[in-house]
């Protein structure tokens, strides 16, 4: 399933949408394919463990297909109750660098011709899964339009995503479709297991979704944070290639203790 979203073709900005111009060879009429993002203003972040995402109902299918969520886990020795961009560098300098690079795309009206898969995967981000092994996009398709997503990383429980107040899904880390084996081997939950932040497992073969933090003192308490971004995906039927909206930051969640 990985790598299934190839780059789209020529695109033009209008508000926060992506426009693909398809010219009809028979009549010369231009049709516009539009993929709208989730506006950043539609997302409410609460403390370090909750986020509410209001999915707009302004996309139509086709061309809209589904939403994807990219994530990356950052090790830290810093506990933050309300993670905001101003403290990202305190949490992990790599988190700050990633956000500084991605943030100009959020709600952008000009930078709408980007291949989001390439941007995020190049930075070490992975696709979010659901417990059982399905990608999160299997439940974030057309029926989710107009719904509310609630992400809950509260202490004492496995992090979840709830759709429409009724359908609850436990979140799983990626294994790159079998390319790497996240640690601990017996759990892919977003929990602050010792093995998640153990430097010996932070590599391309094991926890490839984790980035370490340099300079953590021996014996210091370790925390882990998951940055998550949501992107709308559609299909350019003239080229059969995927096209993307701009991203929005869901939250930087502090992973609960197991």
Image (cartoon, helix red, strand yellow):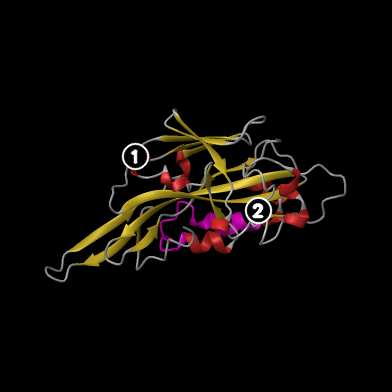
Instruction: Give the residue at mark 2.
Output: 95
Q: Residue furthest bottom?
A: 25
Q: Quadrant of the C terminus?
A: top right
Please give the name of the residue rendered at 43% of the width and 61% of the height, measured from the top-left corner. Answer: 4
Q: In the image, residue 54 lies at what x, y percent?
A: 43, 37
Residue assigned mark 1: 143
Residue at coordinates 42% horizontally, 65% vertically from top-left? 6
Image spot of residue 195 (x, y percent): 74, 47
Asked whether residue 51 appears in the rendered view, the answer is no
Can residue 63 be seen by looking at this rendering? yes
Q: Which mark is residue 175?
A: none
Residue 242 part of the magenta-drawn span: no
* Left or right for 116, reference 184: left
Q: Is residue 111 magenta?
A: yes
Which residues lie in the magenta part? 96-116
First in sequence: mark 1 or mark 2? 2
- Residue located 62% across and 34% down the image: 47
How many numbered marks appear? 2
Q: Provide residue 191's location: percent of width, then percent of height.
A: 67, 40
Q: What is the spatial separation of the Cα atoms under label 1 and label 2, in whole angstroms?
A: 32 Å
From the viewer's side, name the closer residue of 141 and 27.
141
Q: Is residue 139 left or right of residue 133?
A: left
Describe the element under mark 2 as helix, strand or loop. helix
Residue 217 higher or lower than 46, as above or below: below
Labelled pair 1, 2 in contact (Cβ < 8 Å):
no
Q: Report helix, strand or loop for mark 1.
A: helix
Q: Is residue 31 above or below residue 186?
A: below
Q: Compared with residue 99, is residue 252 higher up or lower down, i.e. above or below?
A: above
């Amino acid at each position: 399933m990985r790598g299934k979203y190839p780059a789209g073709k020529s695109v033009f900005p209008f508000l926060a949408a992506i426009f693909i111009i398809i010219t009809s060879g028979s009549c010369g009429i231009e049709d516009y394919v539009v993929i709208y993002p989730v506006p950043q203003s539609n997302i409410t972040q609460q403390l370090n463990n909750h986020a509410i995402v209001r999915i707009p109902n302004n996309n139509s299918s086709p061309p809209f297909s589904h939403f994807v969520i990219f994530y990356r886990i950052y090790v830290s020795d810093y506990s933050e109750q309300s993670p905001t961009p101003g403290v990202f560098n305190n949490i992990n300098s790599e988190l700050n660098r990633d956000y500084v690079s991605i943030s100009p795309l959020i709600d952008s009206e000009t930078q709408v011709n980007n291949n989001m898969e390439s941007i995020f995967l190049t930075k070490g981000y992975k696709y979010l899964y659901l417990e059982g092994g399905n990608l999160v996009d299997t439940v974030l398709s057309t029926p989710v339009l107009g719904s509310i997503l609630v992400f809950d990383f509260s202490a004492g429980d496995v992090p979840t995503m709830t759709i429409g107040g009724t359908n609850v899904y436990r979140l799983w880390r990626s294994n790159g479709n079998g390319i790497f084996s996240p640690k601990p081997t017996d759990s892919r939950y977003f929990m602050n297991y010792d093995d998640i932040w153990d430097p010996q497992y932070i590599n391309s073969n094991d926890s490839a979704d984790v980035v370490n933090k340099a300079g953590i003192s021996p014996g210091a308490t370790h925390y882990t944070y998951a940055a998550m971004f949501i992107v709308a995906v559609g299909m350019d039927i003239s080229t059969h290639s995927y096209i993307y909206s701009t991203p929005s930051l869901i939250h930087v969640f502090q992973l609960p203790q197991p």
